[in-house]
Amino acid sequence: MYRPLSTFIGLRYSQAKHKNRFVSFISIASILGIALGVMVLIVGLSAMNGFEKALRDQLLSVVPHAELEMVSGSFNDIDATIAKIEAQPDVVAATPFITLNGLLQKDNKMKALQIRAIDPRTENNVTNIEKFIKGQGWSLLSPNKNTIILGKSVAEKLQLSIGDSVFLLLPQQGAQTRLKAPRSIPFKLVGIFAMGGQLDSSLAFIHISDAQKILSMDSANAIAFKVNDVLKAQSIARSVGYSLDNYLYIKSWITSQGYLYQDIQMVKSLMYIILLLVVAVACFNIVSTLVMAVNEKRGDIAILKTMGAGKWTLRFIFIVQGAFNGFVGCLLGAMMGIYIALNLTELITHLEALLGHKFLSGDIYFIDFLPSQINYNQVIIITLLAFVMSVLATIYPAWRASNIKPAQELGYSH
């Protein structure tokens, strides 16, 4: 099969043993350095993609995408308002709710948390919290029965079991001027949810009719809704809020949980920069390899020149040699990176079992495992970028090789 002279000689130089063992060592180091950089970059970005997917699929499935809350009072016609919100093009569904902040008391134990009063009939249209509730889900909450569903962490802290009674302590209404004893309202624990993260220790659910009775309200004072594009939740919430005549607080998941998404994006950007620098360092090894290879092959280069080889032919010989190292390194790195990224969750699970230590705690983070989602477009971009960097690293040594003077080199050999 026909191959250009520069390609043929360049590949022969790449596969031939060097007289100087140090040159061979540097050559292998450059291949392994590029492979390691590409592999770590693919694995790291796959982990960040996994966190981003878990954020959307898990955390944003239990946290409402957006909320509208009355500054004072409650909505006059809650059904008409919900219908108007759901008529907006970017809104999927809406549900009313009321928020109370109070203390839960069981004997001498207390826990401060947010009580979310929901409508079980429409809550599933907006969140998937029900799937984390053990037993019968939202049907456990009965209207006007003072039933409550608590997070696993709260139930464990207060040493509560299903069927136990617990008291909800709320400030007295209109108690702004002087200190009054809090109201104590008995509730029966009917369900426990385990969503993971801080939600288990800071959130509880009651029926919306119970909250209306406790607060003497005619209807809900807040509406949660789901949007079709979670990353545009803030702007959608703003446009929906402005379409209503009420004076409202406008919130979205970006306000409360957006720091997680921003942290993931920041880490991804930093990872690109830092690990590409690792690849760049490995490419400097290619420069070192080729500079030493040029010095080793000075006599061969001089002979090729006397036989009529042009400057670009000589340059391409060393460009091919360096590119071969880069290609092998990129290919190895991509293969190892894809394999580890596809099996990252299982590998980390086995490592945790071996060490007896959890890297991600479900009590702190919204997941208790290391997720991974490989993006093959990113793999291609990373591999091509590393290969281009390795080819660019060959230009200086190749240029030096083309400037060798045959008469001077062959004269020295005599």
Image: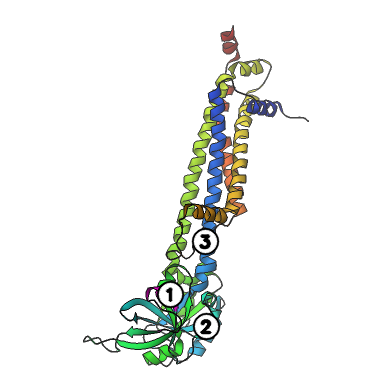
* Front disc: 2 or 3: 2
Q: Secondary structure at mark 3?
A: helix
In x, y percent, where is residue 229? Answer: 55, 70
Q: Residues within 10 Å of mark 2 (few under 14, many from 20)?
A: many
Q: Is residue 87 left or right of residue 210?
A: right
In x, y percent, where is residue 108? Answer: 30, 79
* Front disc: 1 or 3: 3
The residue at which mark 2 appears reads as 138
Image quadrant holding the C terminus, namely top right
Please report the residue visible at 52 percent of the width from the left and 72 percent of the height from the top.
61
In x, y percent, where is residue 357? Answer: 45, 56
The amino acid at mark 3 is Glu
Choose top left, top right, bottom left or bottom right for residue 99.
bottom left
Please report the residue visible at 41 percent of the width from the left and 78 percent of the height from the top.
160
* Front disc: 2 or 1: 2
Q: Which mark is residue 280?
A: none
In x, y percent, where is residue 270? Answer: 46, 50
Residues under numbered marks 2 and 1 in contact, where contact means CB atoms less than 8 Å apart: no
The amino acid at mark 1 is Lys
Q: Estimate the spatial distance between the alpha carbons at disc 2 and disc 3, rounded to whole Å.
A: 28 Å
The residue at which mark 3 appears reads as 52
- Residues in magenta, as a range: 150-164
